[in-house]
């Protein structure tokens, strides 16, 4: 089932989206307000989300060049997951901060970035507290009196985590330690134990002893803890967990031994997802075509390449959205203009003078601006959305809204300076003067 596009947009959602675009960033929420050209994916992806909500698990790879909208796409899909009562987590893969071959670090970042419709990151503590509340409610509903409530909650905890405890017995042990510390009013120990449960290293030894756990989480224990987290999420009212591993192509730049370990860890994750070990998990990775097709990426490990193999020899119009790999082709002049018109209309709906916004930033002007920004990037329209929307909102629409005599055709000259470009955009614009580019009308 497709989530309906809202007809009335709240001031807060509009402001959040426009503020992010003004900064040149992808909004954290409100992506449905900006989505252009993603309707071809909706039916298949919504069906997959529903399957995961029913206990299945899905792995998906999203490929696209820099600037093609991978981050936008995954956040848009994450919002659709949230609308279906999923928890979500977005993780940036990097050699120094989050190396993929250290799954314990990936799990830690997952819990740090865990969010729900009600709680921003990190939502781990509210989720765990909701789980214990659900256990108590289940016990009371079964007729258990207050005197025997703790014993019944312990029985339910053990029963719900039976499968998890086969792989990671310390997960259930830590939950018991957390609840005991709370019951004793020891907030410091409770917080420390929860941090350990979230994969944080260097938790005080006294807190670990109090909870009956030892050491730090390791690579193999991380998969068991992920399994436990999925159980806790399900029993606390969430229908699944949507996880994004973003910028996986950074693996191509690490040492060969670390790269091989990371590629093997990715293969292991895919196999675990497909084996059914993680019911309720929708796992997405993003990367460039060079990562998926090149010898320094996926093709370096034949079993991984086989698992991700997808036919992209046909016209992109006929790409299969049910396939393991999705292709984002980037923006065209037409789709970039369409996106700009969506943003213009969104802005106008909350402006003091909406008619002036629509008249001065009409469709023809937005098309000209899109063409000019693409020209400043060597004609690469496909990577222009970030800069185009930043200029449209911050340089054009804001001025029309605030100054009655401002006319962008008379008073605005598109200027692109190197310090506002990403590395990729800077490389594309190297042949274009950074002093100023006239907007041709």
Image (spheres, rainbow, N blue to C red):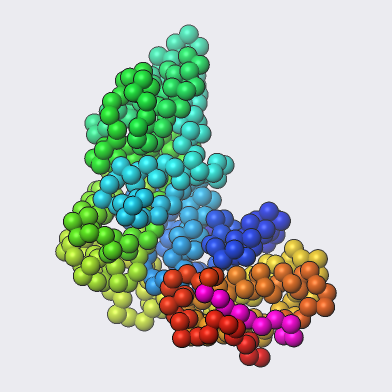
**Stretch of the chain drawn in magenta:** 409-418
Who's the residue at 54% across and 44% down the image?
120
Who's the residue at 50% across and 60% down the image?
76
Image height of 131 relative to 326, above or below: above
Image height of 269 relative to 128, above or below: below
Q: Magenta segment: does it hold 416?
A: yes
Instruction: Where is residue 313? Give x, y as percent.
Output: 29, 80
Q: In this view, does 5 lie to the left or right of 312?
A: right
Q: Quadrant of residue 231?
A: top left
Who's the residue at 40% across and 45% down the image?
110
Q: In this view, does 300 lie to the left or right of 1?
A: left
Q: In which quarter of the image is residue 279?
A: top left
Camera-nearest residue between 113 and 167: 113
Q: Magenta segment: does it hold 177?
A: no
Image height of 377 relative to 127, above or below: below
Who's the residue at 31% across and 76% down the image?
312
Mark yes or no: residue 138 visible: no
Instruction: Where is residue 163? Give x, y as percent.
Output: 28, 33
Camera-nearest residue between 407 and 68: 407
Instruction: Where is residue 368? Give x, y as percent.
Output: 62, 86
Quarter holding the C terminus is: bottom right
The residue sitting at the front extreme is: 435
The residue sitting at the right extreme is: 404
The residue sitting at the top extreme is: 147
Please tell me whether the stretch drawn in magenta is mainly helix, strand or loop: loop
Camera-nearest residue between 302 and 81: 302
């Amino acid at each position: 089932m497709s989530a309906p596009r809202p007809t009335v947009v709240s001031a807060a959602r509009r402001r959040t989206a426009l503020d992010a675009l003004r900064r040149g960033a992808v909004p954290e929420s409100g992506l449905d307000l900006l989505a252009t050209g993603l309707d071809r994916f909706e039916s298949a992806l919504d069906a997959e989300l529903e399957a995961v909500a029913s206990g299945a698990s899905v792995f998906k790879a999203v490929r696209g060049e820099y600037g093609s909208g991978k981050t936008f796409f995954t956040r848009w899909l994450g919002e659709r997951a949230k609308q279906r009562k999923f928890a979500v987590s977005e993780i940036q893969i990097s050699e120094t901060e989050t190396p993929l071959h250290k799954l314990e670090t990936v799990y830690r970042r997952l819990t740090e970035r865990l969010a729900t419709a009600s709680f921003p990151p990190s939502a781990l503590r509210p989720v765990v507290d909701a789980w214990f509340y659900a256990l108590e409610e289940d016990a009371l509903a079964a007729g258990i009196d207050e005197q025997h409530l703790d014993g019944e909650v312990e029985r339910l905890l053990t029963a719900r985590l039976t499968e998890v405890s086969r792989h990671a017995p310390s997960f259930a042990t830590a939950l018991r330690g957390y609840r005991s510390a709370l019951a004793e009013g020891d907030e410091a120990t409770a917080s420390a134990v929860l941090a350990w449960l979230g994969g944080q290293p260097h938790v005080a030894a006294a807190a670990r002893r109090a909870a009956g756990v030892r050491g730090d989480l390791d690579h193999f224990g991380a998969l068991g803890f992920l399994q436990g987290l999925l159980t806790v999420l399900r029993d606390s009212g969430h229908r699944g967990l949507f996880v994004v591993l973003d910028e996986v192509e950074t693996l191509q730049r690490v040492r060969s031994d670390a790269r091989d370990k990371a590629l093997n860890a990715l293969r292991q994750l895919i196999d675990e997802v497909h084996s059914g070990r993680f019911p309720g998990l929708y796992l997405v990775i993003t990367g460039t075509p060079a990562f998926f097709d090149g010898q320094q990426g996926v093709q370096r490990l034949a079993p991984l390449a086989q698992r991700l193999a997808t036919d992209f020899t046909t016209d992109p119009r006929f790409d299969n959205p049910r396939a393991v790999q999705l292709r984002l082709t980037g923006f065209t002049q037409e789709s970039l203009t369409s996106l700009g018109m969506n943003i213009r209309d969104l802005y106008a709906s909350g402006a003091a003078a909406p008619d002036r916004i629509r008249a001065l930033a009409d469709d023809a002007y937005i098309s000209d601006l899109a063409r000019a920004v693409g020209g400043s990037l060597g004609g690469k329209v496909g990577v222009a959305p970030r800069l185009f929307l930043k200029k449209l909102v911050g340089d054009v629409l804001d001025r029309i809204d605030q100054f009655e005599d401002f006319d962008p055709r008379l008073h605005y000259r598109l200027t692109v300076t190197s310090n506002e470009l990403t590395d990729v955009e800077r490389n594309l614009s190297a042949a274009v003067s950074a002093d100023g580019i006239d907007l041709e009308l």
